[in-house]
Image (cartoon, grey):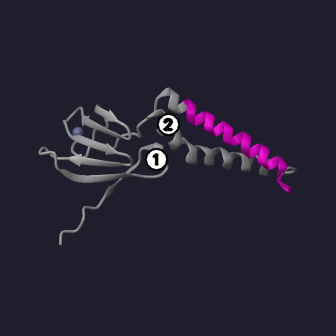
Amino acid sequence: MNLFQVLALNALFLIGLAFGGLFSLVWPGIHADNDLRAGVALVFGIGFVLFFNWPIYRFFGWLPGAPTCPRCGSRKYAIISKNLPAAEYKCIQCGQVILLKDKEIIVLDELGNSYQQLKLKWPYFLGQWRKIPPPANP
Ligand SMILES: [Zn+2]
């Protein structure tokens, strides 16, 4: 995460806190209980981050965190090309090329064929990936 991404995350959390605070002021039964109001505001703050951070990533053209290299386990990549929402990464240590397409990663072998696919897990901005099992051979 770069500085702008951290600032956006903090801003979303604060906006969510403010919305939660306002919401709990007008909701009957909550406004008298300060602990409950703080809890509602916290839930709104976290909810705003979880639901609105990815659209902000998209708006600014930020990429999710890359997965560990499937060949050597490194997380250091060079971005070869970026044509949003797609990008091409090359592992700095071993030269493995991976393709990011929207919320999927396609791992290429030396011949340029796909041999592994990863899917981005929700909430997408965290950059958590899971392997997609290859289709069963008939
Ligand atoms: Zn590698």
Under circle 1, the secondary element is: helix
Name, please, the residue furthest toward the bottom: 138
Which residue is at the front of the view, 75 or 87?
87
Which residue is at the front of the view, 36 or 52?
52
Mark 1 and mark 2: span between their CA atoms?
14 Å
Q: Which mark is residue 59?
A: 2
Q: Which mark is residue 124?
A: 1
Q: Which mark is residue 60?
A: none
Q: Is residue 1 left or right of residue 82?
A: right
Q: Is residue 27 left or right of residue 138?
A: right
Q: What kind of residue is marked 1?
A: Tyr
Q: What kind of residue is marked 2?
A: Phe
Q: Quadrant of ligand 1?
A: top left
Magenta-drawn stretch, dominant element (helix, strand or loop)? helix
Picture coordinates of residue 59, whole percent (x, y): 50, 36
Magenta residues (range): 7-30
Q: Is residue 110 magenta?
A: no
Picture coordinates of residue 77, whole percent (x, y): 29, 33
Instruction: Please tell me whether residue 136 is drawn above or below residue 40 in the rendered image.
Output: below
Under circle 2, the secondary element is: helix
Q: Is residue 8 magenta?
A: yes
Q: Is residue 135 left or right of residue 44?
A: left
Q: Is residue 70 left or right of residue 40?
A: left
Q: Kindly report which numbered mark, 1 or 2, lies closer to the viewer in this rendering.
A: 2
Instruction: Indicate if the residue with disc 1 has its beta carbon within 8 Å of ligand 1.
Output: no
Residue at 41% over, 48% down: 128
